[in-house]
Amino acid sequence: MSERRPKRIEMIRAATFAALFMFSAQVHASSDIGDSWSFEGLSDGDPIVDTNGASLHGMWEGGPFSPTNSAAEAVAISYTQPSGGYPLPLATHNIAMQILGDISNSFNFADDVNLDPTNVWIDLVAQLGQLTFEPDIPADAQLAAYVNTNGDLIVRHTLYTTGFAIGEQTWTTLQVQVSSNSFTAHTPIGTNDFVRLSVMINYITAVELAFAYGENYFQIYLDGVLLASPNGYDLQPDGSGDGPPTGGSWFLCSDSGYGGTGPNNDYLTSVAFSGAGVVDDIVVAESIAAFSTNTPMTAFEQWLTDNGIPPNEGTLDEDNDGASNWAEYVAGTDPDDDSDYFHIVRTEYFGTSNCIWWVIGTETNLATELFVQRATNLTDVNPWSVVASSLTPSGTGTNVWYDTAVPSNAPVYYQPGLSTNAP
């Protein structure tokens, strides 16, 4: 592997590739299955794995190809939320883990089908880059994945044919299954794209229970869409493989437990990455992650979530300052601060003109131009008229406007505003 690895992995801001591996044998374990890693508590440049392969944050360490010649560090990065729902756990994504070489995280297992997790879910966001070749992987890797130069997601698995005949290990291009005999390419993965990868590994089937060490399978979702291939196998809930497909293509693990002699064939013991890339919000759990009906959150729903507000509470007023959560989002103000909302803070008369100061937020949600309305009699049915429009919000948050055509002999009222649709 080392002779074919890209040499410029020191360019940590440009992801060249990161191949995703799930291994079956590691020297020791660092974590328990049922763990997650979000890197938001770190600062840009903080080491996660040092160049000697030692773990500094989150139990990640060097290995398996070059345990003492790899590294990982926190990187400040902003990316568009991948579709398919936000990864678990919900978190902001301003800091991620930049991979430089080979790193891994090993998991404890009990060597007992009654104690170890029988189904394992791996969920993460990754910027994978693209590879021009099929990477070498350890013989005991249960599965691996990479992206080729066409933007296709390629997985390593063992071929399975009908009649319980197991073939050789192979790389397969994943596609979207349109019908029982029809497949189409998934959306290409660009070199700078962030995608959500979700892997479901099924370790216990009727075959497993009957023969102690049975066949182990996995499925892969890309941005919430289940991928498939004619090389996959239509595994049934009871593990028999008989009957019509019920759940899309399953792929036989490369180092399957079928015919195996020990637990290393049957339990996930490590997740590892190789190369140079970025990963974030990694989850390894026994429960299947819930996709949001394959529909990503809207920008507003994500903003609510990032502020600790349920995504269905857009019309409520979180901080009781008189502005709904939607109004705070549009105005770029803080929904948790009752002193931060869109309002006039000062007016002043300068002989022939009135000056109005108002405060508006500085978050990047604000893309609509401002207008100002004026009224002289609030008891009228429609008292407000627009007297200024197409005003650009100030980046400082404080906006100033002069009314140079003030009506005489009447009280004057002002109201700045933004044109927007309700949530």
Image (cartoon, rainbow, N blue to C red):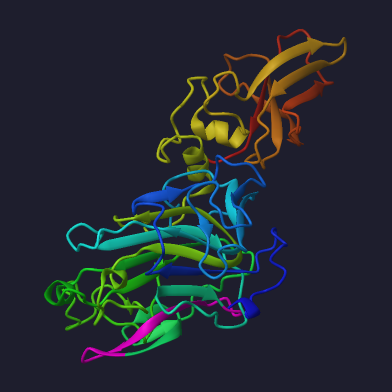
- Asked whether 164 or 104 is in front, the reply is 104
Is residue 102 at all visible to an observer of this figure?
Answer: yes
Task: Look at the picture and state if 269 lies above or below 144.
Answer: above
> The magenta stretch spans which residues?
148-166
Residue 54, position as x, y percentages in the image: 55, 53
The picture quadrant where one finds residue 274 is bottom right
Q: Is residue 389 left or right of residue 96?
A: right
Task: Look at the picture and state if 113 lies above or below 331.
Answer: below
Residue 7, position as x, y percentages in the image: 71, 72
Residue 160 in magenta stretch: yes
- Asked whether 119 or 150 is in front, the reply is 119
Task: Look at the picture and state if 398 lies above or below 168.
Answer: above
Is residue 249 at all visible to an observer of this figure?
Answer: no
Residue 293, position as x, y percentages in the image: 36, 58
The picture quadrant where one finds residue 257 is bottom left
Question: Residue at 19% of width from left, 63% of height from top?
Answer: 113
Residue 4 in magenta stretch: no
Image quarter of the N terminus: bottom right
The picture quadrant where one finds residue 204 is bottom left
Q: Residue furthest top?
A: 409
